[in-house]
Amino acid sequence: MSSIVTLLNQEINNISSDFEVCGVVNHRGKVYPLNSDTKVLSTVFELICRPIVVSVAKQLGYEVVEPLVQNYYPDFSLVKSVVTDEVQQASPEFTLADSRFEKPKIAVDIKTTYRNSRNKFNYTLGGYASFIRPSSERKNIVFPFSDYQKHYIIGFVYSRGKKSNRDSPFVYPVDELDNVPVPIENIEFFVQEKWRIAGDRAGSGNTTNIGSITGTIDDFREGKGPFRSEKEFLTYWRGYERTAEQRAAAYSNLAEFRRFQQRRRI
């Protein structure tokens, strides 16, 4: 599957000048400037990546399926149609019929964040108490988790640009596009398998999200996560408990997990 990483890197790099998005324009030619809010910019980068993912998918013989429900994983599923007349109907619980597409599938998710003062950053990589666990592998995911063979992250990182001063207009005419401030700068990206950049601590405070490593862009590009394999990553996070009290009886970091696994083998 390394070809998908190569193709995504090549095509995203070719349109890197498109990253300097400054605002949202309506049909009347009014431009509403963006700020450096990560939630807004995540949507922007997802839109920029969309034609690239579709193009790469076609080159590799895949179609692209996007979520029909908000906040479902992943942003893009690369799939191949089943060559058969026997197609199971979709159900209310599962909006896409199981047998419409072959196994395995490929997941591509977009992540966006900003650098800290030390030029490092991190992400959250989805929940550890939902679809990665076999008992709930259909929860908040487009296809059952076991359908996916690979999980890739296209990650963007940026530095926050200069803030607009209080006299800056909130709306610009489209013919003054050059005057609209760009809220971010020094934008870089990477493409990497999820397990290779995952950390061993939860992200986002008290939520049940997998945290990534904290590192530089090179750390993410090289996949310098602590896990030895995707199997170890999945076993670790499938058993990771929700509370500190529960983790105290099992493990709360990778070193403890490996000792825990060793004791279970004895």
Image (tube, rainbow, N blue to C red):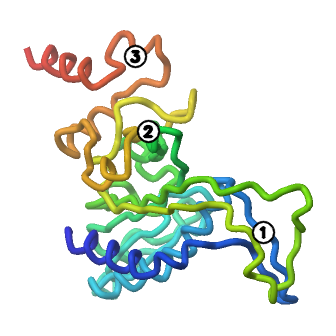
- The reply to whether discs 1 and 3 touch (Cβ–Cβ < 8 Å) is no
**Rendered location of residue 153, percent (x, y):** 39, 58
Q: Is residue 215 above or below residue 61?
A: above
> Which numbered tag is attached to residue 210?
2
Nearer the observer, disc 3 or disc 2? 2
User: Left or right: 170 with respect to 36?
Assistant: right
- Label 1 and label 2: CA atoms lie apart by 32 Å
- In the image, residue 120 lies at what x, y percent? 44, 42
Q: What residue is disc 1 on?
A: 33
How crowded pointer 2 is (Cα within 10 Å; few <14, some 14-19, many 20+) is rated as: many
The foreground one among 70 and 100 is: 70
Q: Secondary structure at mark 2?
A: strand
Inspect the image, locate mark 1, and give the three-letter code of the amino acid beneath it.
Pro
Q: Residue at x 52, y 63 (%)?
A: 94
Q: Quadrant of residue 260?
A: top left
Q: Closer to the camera, 161 or 8?
A: 161
Q: Earlier in the sequence, mark 1 or mark 3?
A: 1
As shown in the figure, which amino acid type bears the numbered disc 2? Answer: Ile
- Pointer 1 local density, CA inside 10 Å: few below 14, some 14–19, many at least 20: many
**Residue 157, above or below 81:** above
Please, what is the three-letter code of the amino acid marked with disc 3?
A: Arg
The quadrant the N terminus occupies is bottom left
Location of mark 3 (residue) = 247
User: Which secondary structure, mark 1?
Assistant: strand
Q: Are marks 3 and 2 in contact (CB under 8 Å)?
A: no
Residue pictured at 35% horizontal, 75% vertical: 79
**How far is mark 3 from mark 2, CA to CA?**
15 Å
Q: Which is in the foreground here, disc 1 or disc 3?
A: 1
Q: CA distance from mark 1 to mark 3?
A: 45 Å
Residue occupying the point 62% across, 65% down: 43
Please state the total of marks drawn on the protein image: 3
Observer-side mark, 1 or 2, equals 1
